[in-house]
Amino acid sequence: MNYGYKILIVPFICFFAQEAWSQQSALLETYVYEGLQNNLSLKQESLEIRKATEAIRQAKALFYPSVTFAPTYSYAAGGRRLSFPVGDLLNPAYKTLNELTGSNQFPTNIENVNELLAPTNFHDTKISFKLSVYNPEIKYNYLIQKSLLSAQEAKRKVIENELRYNIETAYYQYLQSVEAIRIYENGLKVLHELVSLNKKLVANHTATRDILFSSEYEVSKLKQQLVEAEKNNEVAKAYFNFLLNRNLTDPILADTLLLTRGPAEGSLTNLTQLADHALANRQELKQLDQSIEASRQAVLLQERAAYWPSLFIGGNAGFQGYGYTFKGQEYAIVQAGMTWDIFKGYERKSKIQQAKIQTELLKTKQTEVEKQIELQATQAYYDFAAGMEAQQVAESGVLNAGQYFKIVDSRYRNGNLLLIEYIKARNDVLTAQLQLSVTRYETFVKKAMLNKIVAEP
C-alpha cells in the first residue's frame, strides 16, 4: 500500500461494552467542572440563592421578640397653650373660707394655669419590647420564603444542566474542527505527492503539462478549504473558552481517547424509561413544584389572615419626666393587644382568589412542561438512535471510498487512468472522511442532548 493511501485511511470507531460507554471523558469533565465554577450566570444565581437565604432569616426573625432602646427628649418654644384662670376662681373663695373659719387653712396665692401644650425639657427614656403570640402572616411568609429558596436552587441546577450541555457541545465542535484540519492537511499531502508524480511524468514526456496545472489547481482549492477550517477552529476555541470564562485564545487539550470509546449508549434501553428518568430528574419540574408550594402557602396566609386575629404582647420600662433627674421618674407598662380586620372592602377575599388563580396557573404550566419534556425525550431518543446508524453508514462510506481510491491510485500510477478520475476518487475519500467526522461528533452532541433531557451527566 502506498503512502497516499495510508494517510487517507481513518481508523474505525471501536465500540466497547456498556460499562465503557458510561464513563465520562475525564478531560471533558474537568472542563465542565471549570465552567461550572467560573461561569458568570451561575455566579449570579449563587448570589440570588444567598439573597433568598437572607430573606428566610429575616422572616424567621419575626418569630422572636423585638427589644428597642428608645430615649426621647423634648424642648418646646411657642405653640398652643393651655390657659385656665384657676387662681382667679379659687383665691377669693379660699379667702372667704379662711375668714369664716378664722384660720389660714386654704391657700390664697394660687396662680392661673398658662402652660405650653408641647412639653418642654421633658424626656422619655425607655426600653420597649414586643412579641407576636399569633400572627398567620409571619408563619406563612416564612414557609413561602423557604419554598422560594428551594425554587431558586432548582433554577440554578437548570442553568447548570444547560451550561454542561453547552460546554460539551462546544468541546465536540472544537474537536471536529481540529479533525477537519487534520483531514485537509492529509489531503494536501496526497495532492503534493500527486503533483510530484505528475512533474516526473511531464519530465519523462509520458504526460502533457495540463495534468500538472490541474493537480496544482486542486492543491490551491484544498488550501482555501484548509484556511476556512482553521478559521472555524479559532472560532470554536474562542466560544469554548468563553463558556469557561477564560481567555479566548487559551489552548484546549484534545481528548485522544474520546473517539476510541464513542458516545455512550448508557443504561436507558427504551423510550419509556428515558421519559420517566427525565420527568423524575428535571429541575424545571422541581422548580415549579416549589413555586406551587409557595403559592399554596400564600393562599393559606390570606385565608388565615382574613378569618383569624393577630395577638401580641409588649410593654415599656424606663424613666419619664421633666429634666434628666431619673429620681421618682421610673415607670413600667405591660400590654396585650389584638388586631382583627373586620372589613376591608373585600380586599382579603380578592387576595385569596388571586393566590388560588396563581396556584392553578402554575399547575397548568407544570403540566405543559411535563408534556414538553416527554416530547424532548422522544426527539432526543430517536435523534441519537439515528445518529448512531448514520455514523455506521459513514464509516462504511470511508472504507469503501478508501478501497476504491487504492485501486484508482494504482491504475493512475500505471498510466491506465485519467487524472479527472483520480481527482474524483480523491475528493470522494475527502468528502467521506469529512462526513464521518461531522456525523461522529454530531452523535456525541446528540448524546449530550440526551443527557441534558434526562438531567444526568
Image: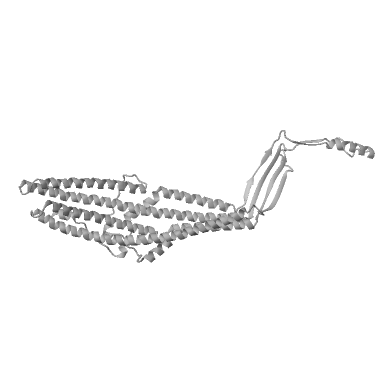
Please give left or right for residue 45 compared with residue 18 in the image: right
Residue that appears at 45% across and 54% down: 155
Q: Is residue 411 left or right of residue 451?
A: left
Q: Is residue 403 visible?
A: yes
Horizontally, is 96 left or right of 151 in the view? right
Q: Nearer the viewer, residue 269 or 253?
A: 269
Q: Which of the colour schemes (rainbow, by chain, secondary structure, one colour) is used?
A: one colour
Residue 360: % across, % down: 52, 59
Q: How many marks?
A: 0
* Residue lying furthest left: 205
The answer to whether residue 457 is visible is: no
- Measured as percent of width and height from the top left, residue 36 is found at 39, 51
Rendered position, 322 above or below 301: above
* Residue drawn at the location 87% of the way across and 36% of the way down: 91
Placement of the N terminus among the 4 image quadrants: bottom left
Residue 58 in picture, x, y percent from top left: 55, 50
